[in-house]
Image (spheres, helix red, strand yellow):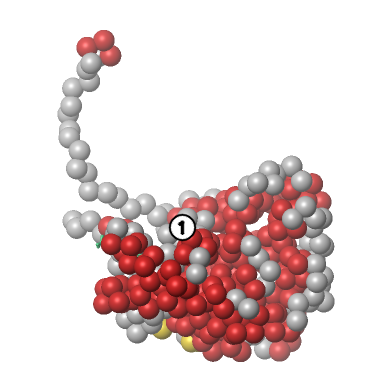
């Protein structure tokens, strides 16, 4: 049997949620092109789509929004624990620990019936934003701001994170970013969630594992690494030489390349336009210019190999503009991707829920003698 390194090209289940045409650079959630959703939908509506497989009717959407909004507040016990979490912890570690603690606080943690999973999933989708915003406030030495139920998910997230109600433009930017990051098939974190859930462990455990996986710089952590790269480069004038040196040393340019896309990631196209908008309007032009030069210079070498900017390349410029420091970029990704994780767990349970257990080709020896300790 051939070894499929990195499980590349291995189909382990069926899914209706997401289609990625990696050669053409196209992405669909339940058949709807991502660009349309990013432009016209909201995070709540897209989440309904990911959980139900169709767009909601007006009344359904209103009820769904009310339901999600009513679940935003965190248990007092968790808020008290937050004060004991180390302030220096990375926000992804904070989120990972908070999700795990939420599991301990749920007396019905182990209920994985379809209905329980749906209800707990909605709870996590609503609460991720509250956890991340509370962490941001605590890191700034300020008290967490309780959620408001009269704001949209995107607006309330920004309100809790920054202490002021966002403008309609900021709300739209956040909504678009959340929609773009909500789902992406069987990426590493979703696969991790499914691998854990296939043992019939509880939802919190599966999602904790997914957060842990998203943290890595080859996956969700790349958006933070891109901003570190921008800082290291410093000025647009230095960007070309920096890229040439990096590639000469065979090092990777963060925010570029993708296991599935061998063309421009369509989400990077949308985020590039949003980043350009904030660069022109709000003075993030230096960061944006550096990225444009990196894209062009690295592209000379990498584009012919099918390596282009991915979703993590331009997102940080938008998040900076919305008031977030670079450590919060990956948590924002998680605030969005929780919708996809929950959707996939519900779908996998419905379709299959077969235990995931791949194998490796054994390349070791057999029947080696056991040498007693004193003779080794
Ligand atoms: C939300 C997301 O998770 S999107 C991805 C976010 N991650 C990043 O942006 C990190 C940078 N990118 C990467 O590390 C990779 O492109 C990955 C891991 C995302 C996907 O790559 P894979 O399909 O697994 O390809 P793999 O890691 O095997 O690399 C194949 C070749 O392309 C090169 N390559 C891949 N990405 C890059 C990059 N960003 N810069 C330079 N070279 C690259 C590798 O060095 C390797 O070269 P080699 O064949 O000479 O050894
Ligand atoms: O699909 C992947 O491999 C990585 C991912 O999560 C994304 O691009 O959003």
Q: Is residue 179 visible?
A: no
Location of residue 67 in the rendering, given as x and y in whole percent from the top left corner: 75, 72
Q: Name the residue nearer the viewer: 47 or 197.
A: 47
Q: Residue at x 61, y 81 (%)?
A: 278
Q: Is residue 353 above or below residue 202?
A: below
Residue 262: which quarter of the image?
A: bottom left
Q: Give the image location of residue 286, x and y in percent.
A: 55, 75
Q: Secondary structure at mark 1?
A: loop
Residue at left 70%, top 84%?
A: 169
Residue, far front: 237
Quadrant location of the C terminus? top left
Q: Is 177 placed above or below 31 here? A: above
Is residue 245 shown above or below 151?
above
Q: Position of residue 260 (x, y in %)?
A: 36, 72
Q: How many marks?
A: 1
Q: Residue at x 17, y 33 (%)?
A: 366
Front residue (pair 125, 328): 328
In the image, taking residue 166 as reference, residue 214 lies left or right, namely: left
Disc 1 residue lies near ligand 1 with CB under 8 A: yes
Determine which residue is flagged by label 1: 217
């Amino acid at each position: 049997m051939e070894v499929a390194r990195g499980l590349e090209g291995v189909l382990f289940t069926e899914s209706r949620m997401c289609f990625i045409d990696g050669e053409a650079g196209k992405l669909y959630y339940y058949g709807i092109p991502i660009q349309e959703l990013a432009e016209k939908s909201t995070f709540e509506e897209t989440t309904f789509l990911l959980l139900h497989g169709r767009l909601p009717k007006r009344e359904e959407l209103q009820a769904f929004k009310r339901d999600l909004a009513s679940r935003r507040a965190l248990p007092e016990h968790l808020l008290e624990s937050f004060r004991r979490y180390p302030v220096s912890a990375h926000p992804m570690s904070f989120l990972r620990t908070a999700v795990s603690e939420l599991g301990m606080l749920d007396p019905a943690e182990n209920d994985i019936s379809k209905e329980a999973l749906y209800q707990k999933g909605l709870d996590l989708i609503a609460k991720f934003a509250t956890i991340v915003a509370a962490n941001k406030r605590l890191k700034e030495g300020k008290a967490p701001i309780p959620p408001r139920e009269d704001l949209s998910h995107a607006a309330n997230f920004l309100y809790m994170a920054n202490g002021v109600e966002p403008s309609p433009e900021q709300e739209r930017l956040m909504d678009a970013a959340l929609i773009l990051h909500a789902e992406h098939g069987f990426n590493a974190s979703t696969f991790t969630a499914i691998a854990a859930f296939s043992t019939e462990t509880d939802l919190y455990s599966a999602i904790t594992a997914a957060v842990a996986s998203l943290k890595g710089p080859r996956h969700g952590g790349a958006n933070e690494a891109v901003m570190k790269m921008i800082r290291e480069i410093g000025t647009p004038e230095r960007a070309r030489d920096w890229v040439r040196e990096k590639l000469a040393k065979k090092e990777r340019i963060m925010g570029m390349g993708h296991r599935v896309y061998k063309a421009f990631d369509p989400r990077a196209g949308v985020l590039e336009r949003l980043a350009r908008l904030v660069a022109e309007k709000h003075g993030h032009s230096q960061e944006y210019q550096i990225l444009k030069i990196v894209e062009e210079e690295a592209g000379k070498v990498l584009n012919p190999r099918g390596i282009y900017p991915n979703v993590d390349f331009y997102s940080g410029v938008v998040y900076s503009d919305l008031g977030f420091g670079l450590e919060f970029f990956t948590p924002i990704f998680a605030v969005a991707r929780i919708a996809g994780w929950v959707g996939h767990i519900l779908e996998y349970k419905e379709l299959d829920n077969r235990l995931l257990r791949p194998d490796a080709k054994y390349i070791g020896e057999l029947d080696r003698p056991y040498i007693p300790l004193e003779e080794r």
